[in-house]
Amino acid sequence: MDVKKYGPWAVVAGGSDGIGAAFVRELAKHGINVMPIARNRNTLDALRDDVAEAYPDVEIVPLVADLADMGAVDQIAEATGDREVGMLIYNVGSEPNYGDFLDHDRDFVTGRMNRNFTVKALITHHFATLMRARGSGGVILMGSMSGYFGNPGFSLYSASKAFTRYLSEGLWGEFREYGIDLLCPVVGPASTPTMLNAYGELDNASDPADIARQALEQIGNGPVWVEPAIEEQIGAMDRMAPAERVQLSAKWAREFVTEGTKPSL
């Protein structure tokens, strides 16, 4: 896959560390300028400096924005301006807050709904409209194995990842008529700062750099790419009755949070 055809600019939402930062580095390696978006200015600036040192001919322009805020959509559209954005990666959305849905307050729920549903759809709409006018582009909407089953303790998160997968499948069918490639990479636990800070060391967690590299390699093979390490678990869950599936996913979630273990059958 010639990643450079998705330039000259890429926008990576949730691009300051973990998988998002890995995407920034991988895109820069291919000569694509990147606007990484996140809430933390210091982390973004550190990433910019690191990538600039490795790839001095590539522009990295960080943008501080809170994707749980509906105003982020207009903020991002204004910040990108007339830059030709050939790649959008919506990576924000990992969940460090394990707990019952009813134990989260209304502001938490509203923010998660904005970030993982509405803002995601609106930002995709904005950039894909511009890509359609040019007749080319690429969109990556990060998925998760949690999108294949209701996940007690992560109920809103798993619902958002199911939304992402089905949105991706539908948009893939539409976008291919416009020359826009779309992919939803479905991944398991990854060794990212957010997950490490929330749950500690994770057993056999995936390397963010591997995920980013493989996702970019697979973008022309949408709509969905499942990380090979979790194919067996997803296949088994699909064959289960709903009640059995939910009970197993609840067990996986507890073990993940308390022991840092990756889901296993």
Image (cartoon, rainbow, N blue to C red):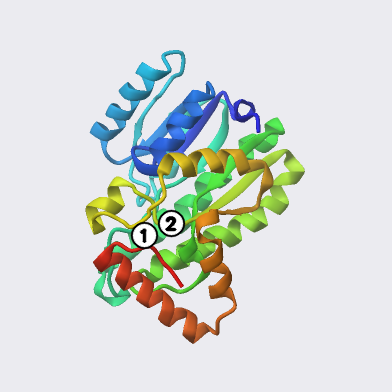
x, y percent for residue 104: 26, 70
x, y percent for residue 79: 43, 30
Observer able to see residue 112 = yes
Q: How packed is label 1: few (under 14 Cα within 10 Å), some, or many (20 or more)? A: many
**Which residue corresponds to the image point at 69% horizontal and 46% vertical from the top-left?**
175
- Say whether marks 1 and 2 touch (CB < 8 Å): yes
x, y percent for residue 32: 52, 24
**Which residue corresponds to the image point at 46% horizontal and 68% vertical from the top-left?**
159
Observer able to see residue 75 = no
At label 1, which amino acid type do we have?
A: Arg
**Which residue corresponds to the image point at 40% horizontal and 64% vertical from the top-left?**
157
Q: Give the residue pinned by disc 1.
A: 112
Give the structural element (helix, strand or loop) at label 2.
Answer: helix
Q: Give the residue pinned by disc 2.
A: 116
In front: 51, or 107?
A: 51
At label 2, which amino acid type do we have?
A: Asn
Distance between mark 1 and mark 2 Cα atoms: 6 Å
Q: How packed is label 2: few (under 14 Cα within 10 Å), some, or many (20 or more)? A: many
In front: 78, or 206?
A: 206
